Image (spheres, rainbow, N blue to C red):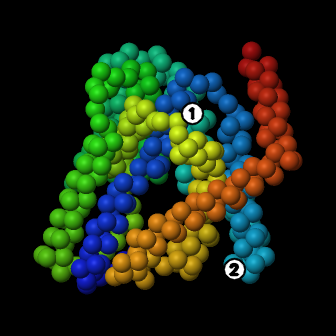
Amino acid sequence: MGGGVDTSLSIVNWVIVNYVIFLTAVGVNCYVLISGYFLVKSDFKLNKIVKIWFQTLFYSVGIYVILSCAGIISFDIKGLVVSGLVIRGNPYWFVTQYIALLFLSPFLSKLALSLAKSQFQLLLSVLFFINVSLSFGFPYGEIYSSPVSISWFLFLFCVAAYIRLFNPFAQRKLEYGKYYLIFCLILLICYLLYEYSLCHWRGMNISYRNSPAYNGYTLFSSILLFLWAKHYSFKKNILYRFIVRLAPYTFGVYLIHDNPYIRTLLWEDWIVPSEYVGSWMLLPKMVIYVVLIYLTCTLLDYLRAKFFLLLKINESINMMCERILLVLKKYSK
């Protein structure tokens, strides 16, 4: 979302929105960190991978068919086939990389469990230099990796595995949540100074950024938020139970609202945030829209889960995967 900033209110909105972007850009990294934290000591589960694949297939094809029948997009066989190719068609880059990570997780776990602490630290150092990209070409993430590559996901897995196995921050009672907020604020200030220099010295217009790179400074804010969630003692109140109830449908929320067709409709046709850049309604409307989108997608995924339960799809997947693993175990002897 771009455009010049002309009013004081626009500048205030611009600053707040960019701070929110830095706060929320950690989502992908934290999801992978959480996965690595638990997977390093978990058994390989083929049925989990198949369920993720099938749920993605369900939404990718289902959304394409529904939008085609509604006349919102034009239908063609090629588009239908591409929407059904969860990996090759790559309708969701995160799912593509995440499924690869899940297949590699048992081997990564064996590697992690076999390493001494000093060896693991050396491994993390090497992975850091070949995956992370901070600034001025340092380290070498721009050469060897990207924020949407399997290499980046492997690095995050190893970071989380190290935290799980060696618990390096156990003796330090740090307020990670406060440091997370402060670090994002520092990133915002640096970004504001950078934008000001572009505007002042090069005469360029200030613009809204989309998202910081996952493999840049966002890595540190992601780890801080992850550590905050790990060490914080949450009170099991109504809000806690509500969040726990919603959590199983978060992946479905992602699959629905970040579908390539839905994403375009949401932010370019139905909701156009750039129209409110100079209005005090920008932030209230964005909060309302985000909440509505999240709750609507949660309801849709809840209905999808009930539909799968009715058709016993998950049971069928479990049985199929058990048979596949038995066959593989038989022929691997």
Q: Name the residue under label 1.
A: 104
Q: Is residue 226 above or below residue 67?
A: above
Q: Is residue 15 left or right of residue 20?
A: left
> Which percent across, then down, holds residue 9?
28, 78
Element assignment for label 2: loop
> Which percent across, then down, holds residue 98?
56, 44
Q: What residue type is labelled 1?
A: Leu
Which residue is found at the position 81% from the left and 52% from the top?
Answer: 307
Q: Label 2 crowding class (10 Å Cα cut-off): few <14, some 14-19, many 20+?
A: few
Task: Give the label, 2 or 1, closer to the camera.
Answer: 2
Q: Nearer the viewer, residue 191 or 17?
A: 17
**C-alpha separation, residue under disc 2 versus residue under disc 1:** 39 Å
Which residue is found at the position 42% from the left and 17% from the top?
Answer: 115
Residue that extends furthest to the left in the rendered view of this protein: 201
Element assignment for label 1: helix
> Which percent across, then down, holds residue 160?
43, 32
Q: Mark 2 points at which residue?
A: 72
Q: Is residue 112 left or right of residue 124?
A: right
> Which percent across, then down, holds residue 207?
31, 74
Number of marks present in the image shown: 2
